[in-house]
């Protein structure tokens, strides 16, 4: 099963903010775009209950 999610990513001043449109509560704020993307991945996995092995 391959689910796709929509990440909204914006720069606000010195910060990058983003969220996943389909999952309420998956939102993050980081200093760089790359850090934001990684934080969104981790937060989405946690919200979906996906564990890393």
Image: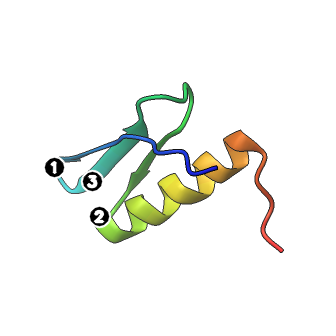
Query: Disc 3 vs disc 2: which is toward the camera?
Result: 2
Counting residues from the start of the chain, the first of labels 3 and 2 encountered is 3
Apparent side of residue 52 relative to residue 34 in the rendered image (left or right): right
Question: Is 13 positioned to the left or the right of 36 in the image?
Answer: left
CB of mark 1 within 8 Å of CB of mark 3? yes
Say if 52 sits above or below 25 in the image: below
10 Å crowding of disc 3: few (<14), some (14-19), many (20+):
few
Hey, which quadrant is residue 48 in on the image? top right
Residue that numbered label 1 is attached to: 13
Label 1 crowd bin: few (<14), some (14–19), many (20+), radius 10 Å: few
The mark lying in front, picked from 2 and 1, is 2
> Of all residues shown, which one is farthest toward the front?
1
Can residue 32 be seen? no
Q: Secondary structure at mark 1?
A: loop
Circle 2 — which element? helix
The local secondary structure at tag 3 comes to strand
Please name the residue shown 76% across and 53% down the image.
50
Determine which of the numbered discs, if any, sits on residue 33 in the image. Answer: 2
Residue found farthest to the top: 24
Marks 1/3: CA–CA distance: 6 Å
At x 59%, y 47%, the residue is 44
Q: CA distance from mark 3 to mark 2?
A: 9 Å
Tell me if residue 40 comes above or below residue 47 in the rendering.
Answer: below
Q: State the residue at coordinates (55%, 25%).
A: 24
Q: Using the image, tell me which numbered label, if any, was put on residue 21.
A: none
The residue identified by callout 3 is 15
Image quadrant in which the C terminus is located: bottom right
Name the residue rendered at 32%, 45% in the picture. Answer: 17
Q: CA distance from mark 2 to mark 1?
A: 12 Å
**Percent from the top left, x then y, of residue 21?**
41, 30
């Amino acid at each position: 099963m391959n689910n796709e999610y929509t990440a909204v990513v914006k720069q606000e001043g010195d910060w990058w903010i983003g969220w996943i449109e389909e999952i309420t509560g998956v939102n993050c704020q980081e200093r760089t775009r790359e850090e934001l993307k990684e934080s969104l991945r981790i937060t989405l996995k946690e919200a979906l209950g996906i564990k890393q092995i």
